[in-house]
Image (cartoon, rainbow, N blue to C red):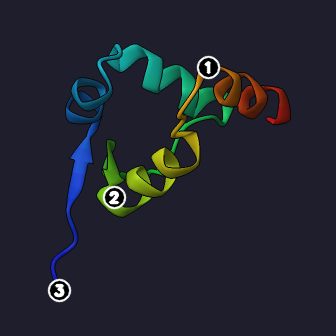
């Protein structure tokens, strides 16, 4: 079974954010787990999807409650 990885640029595009935001998140310990191999940063797609899962909201109130817990 082959694992799929995203680099910083691809993940930033997926989430419509700046690659610098991902850099800051790595510095502050936020965001999904990542691998640093030979100076390159990659994110395992399964880890990205696991990070996205609990952040799925169906209403604004639900999103506000999620942020309050974190």
Q: In the image shown, does 34 or 13 lie closer to the viewer?
A: 13
Rendered residue at 83%/27% (across/down): 68
Position of the N terminus by quadrant: bottom left
Q: What residue is disc 1 on?
A: 60
Q: Earlier in the sequence, mark 3 or mark 1?
A: 3
Q: Are marks 3 and 1 in contact (CB under 8 Å)?
A: no
Q: In which quarter of the image is the C terminus?
A: top right
Tell me whether the residue at label 2 lies in contact with that at label 1, contact meaning CB atoms closer than 8 angstroms. no
Query: In the figure, 25 relative to 32: above or below?
Result: above
Image spot of residue 46 (x, y percent): 36, 63
Left or right for 58, reference 34: right
Residue 14 coordinates in the image, percent (x, y): 25, 31
Name the residue at 55% across, 33% down.
26
Q: How far apart are marks 2 and 1 (CA)?
A: 29 Å
Residue at image location 23% in from the left, 47% down from the top:
6
Foreground tag (3 vs 1): 1
Residue linked to disc 3? 1
- Number of residues whose C-alpha sits closer than 10 Å to that of mark 3, classed few (under 14), some (14–19) or many (20 or more): few
Question: Relative to 49, is 55 above or below?
Answer: above
Q: Which residue is the site of mark 2?
A: 44
Instruction: Tell me if mark 2 has few (under 14), some (14-19) or many (20+) residues whose alpha carbon lies within 10 angstroms of its own.
Output: some
The residue drawn where x is 51% and y is 40% is 56
Q: Residue furthest left?
A: 2
Q: Is mark 1 on a helix, strand or loop?
A: helix
């Amino acid at each position: 079974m082959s694992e799929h990885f995203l680099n910083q640029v691809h993940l930033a595009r997926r989430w419509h954010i700046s690659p610098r935001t991902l850099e800051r998140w790595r510095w502050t310990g936020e965001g999904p787990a990542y691998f640093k191999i030979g100076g390159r940063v990659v994110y395992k797609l399964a880890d990205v999807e696991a990070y996205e899962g609990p952040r799925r909201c169906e209403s604004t109130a639900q999103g506000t409650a999620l942020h309050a817990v974190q």
